[in-house]
Image (tube, rainbow, N blue to C red):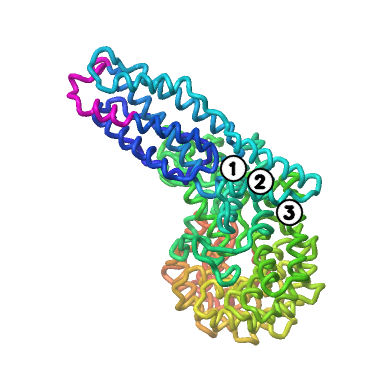
Amino acid sequence: MIRNINGSDRRVLTFPAVHPCEDISLSTLLSSLITLSHTISNFKCKFFSSNKRNARKVINLVQLLQPFFQEILENESGHIPGSGTGSATLCFSELHITFQKLLFLLEDLTREGARLRMLMESGRVANHFRVLARSVATALDVFSFGSVEVEMKEQVQLLMSQARKGKFEVEADDKRATMVVMEALTGFENRFDPNEGDVRWVLDHIGVRTWSECNKEVKFLDSEIGFEGFNEGSRKVGFLCSLMALMSYCRCLFMEVVEEGNKKCDKVGESIESENGMVLSSINSDDFRCPISLELMSDPVTIETGHTYDRCSILKWFTSGNLICPKTGKRLGSIELVPNLVLRRLIQQYCYANSIPIADLGRRNRDIIRNVQPGSLAQQEAIKMVAGSLCGMLENGVVAEKNRGAFEMRLLSKTSIFNRSCLVEAGSVPLLLKLLSSRDSSAQENAIAALLNLSKYPKSRALIVENLGLELIVAVLKKGLKIEARHHAAAVLFYLASNDGYRKVIGEEPDAIPSLISLIKDGSGSDRAKKNGLVALFGLVMHQPENQKRVLEADAVSLLVNIIKGCEKEELVTDSLAVLAIMAEKSEGAAAILHCGALPAALEILSSSTSRVGKEHCVSLLLSLSKNGGPDVVAYLVKSSSLMGSLYSQLSEGTSRASKKASVLIRILHDFYDRRSSGFKVSVIPREQFIDVW
């Protein structure tokens, strides 16, 4: 009768109730209403972080109505009051909608991670309870009690009176807790530490007593900031940033023991990589790309046909006068856009797992998350205090305290560029570099992971190099105590290589490129390690001929060709193709690639791969090989029966870059075929006749 709504995919304090069907039978409606009331009653045993009494009042009201619903259901349809006129159906339909809203409200109040947010919304929540209780009484007014004998008639009428007159006020403890939070935020703005005793009382009041519970609060507030960022008129973002800063402060400085779930970790950060609950290895990343722009979607929305697009792309499509589905060509009866929250969450997890900068979440959100500016003054000063305290742990603490400090830096630097800037300004980079030499595997891993996050902030890259960090990072890459530390080190090199000067300096480190190749070759069975190694290698060879020579000398080409020939992981194949495409730009690289037999493998990937990015790299590789590998390469390509079809498909389906490269390669093949057909013995058309499309 009613679609199943998953409360975890909603925003806080929204009530997407669904009206029952107009032609629904009364018995079906009552059965659904009874089920819904039982679900609400089950909340009686759950913990409420705020509005405890108000929640229990409403639960009791619903619970006391259950026997009434059951009595009506057991009556025959002819004895149901108002059944002929539809007044009973109207009454129970309105109750059904109200109960749905009550259920959503109770879910919000008991949601893990949302406890501080719900405390600060205490007044609004109390008002919702008051309105919904009145709605119950109003719906029951429609019921014709005078036309039927109902045993619970007087009890129900008493409940209606209580629902109308009942007071749903903010409780004294909730008011006090809210005041303490506001005082703490004001203290941050004035650069004063909050009163620890008062803040701990608030945490206890809302049931945030462990590190993991505090961390859930930070994560939830972070996600709320992202969603509120879509609303250009929202004034909540700055306040949410302040609350997140307060919980970050508490997590770093008040919580003594780090836990993961209900299991206490022996070492800080032991299982941090498991925090992305879903397994992404079996997902094709191309499913995360918008069919219109071919870029990773930042705000996926689903249209009437069931197909999903990035919001900005489909809106441009509609505003251009196209009222059809881009994929199916079907004319749309409605251009309503439904946010695909599950897909958005998967895209965010994928970006984090693969060290990809998360796509912009709207202009307002971008201003806060992707720029150095804080969301509020309280956030600015709170994070500065936290950064200073964590640097003190690294500088003066024992090994366990240094490990804890590095772990908290690792988490804090993951959230925003502003957090990274505060940590860098506080002097974290030299302290983290010193920790890379630690013989404690967790401390080393947390330090290099924190440096990885900080290396995404340009100023920190200069500090890493200036503090002689390259040698230390390469040492971790070569012989880190854990494979996780090694692949984090590779990722740091990738970000450092975004600077032309550092790219050259890294290549001059004797162990840098050989260690990357070793990581790709072995990787201790970790696809993540191999991927980071490939990405870092790609960063080093781009626009750097000296590094390309070093890669050739290290015999990396045969390793990369073997990956594209036999690896089942499409992502690793795509990354290997990217490196080979750059190597093929020089005649020496092209010769080595051809010698290893890459040509047939590249042709097969182009015709069979489902990855748009992989196909683009294939076209780039084949184009460079045709230009630098001699006429035999072009002659071989001309004989391929599937190549032309694959290239023409890139003209219409590929990115603009892939389309340009495919167009040039098609021209090369046509010209070669025409010249061969004319009987002239000529080599491939001189290179200067072709445009460079890299």
Question: Residue 500: where, in percent of width, then height?
Answer: 76, 69
The answer to which image quadrant residue 439 occupies is bottom right
Label 2 sits on residue? 243
In the rendered structure, the answer to whether residue 322 lies left or right of residue 45 reads right
User: How far apart in space, not on screen, are marks 2 and 1 (Cα)?
Assistant: 8 Å
Label 1 sits on residue? 117
Q: Is residue 119 visible?
A: yes
Label 3 sits on residue? 383
Q: In this view, does 679 lie above or below 461?
A: below
| Disc 2 to disc 1: CB gap under 8 Å | yes
Question: Residue 189: where, in percent of width, then height?
Answer: 78, 45
Question: Residue 186: where, in percent of width, then height?
Answer: 75, 42
Disc 2 packing (10 Å; few <14; some 14–19; many ≥20): many
What residue appears at the point 44 percent right and 73 percent down from the top-left corner? 568
Considering the numbered disc 3 on the image, is that residue within a helix, a strand or a loop?
helix
Who is closer to the viewer here, 284 or 596?
A: 284
Q: In which quarter of the image is the C terminus?
A: bottom right
**Residue 83, magenta (yes or no):** yes
Type of amino acid under label 1:
Arg
Considering the numbered disc 1 on the image, is that residue within a helix, a strand or a loop?
helix
Which residues, given as a range, are shown in magenta? 65-85
Disc 1 packing (10 Å; few <14; some 14–19; many ≥20): many
The answer to which image quadrant residue 49 occupies is top right
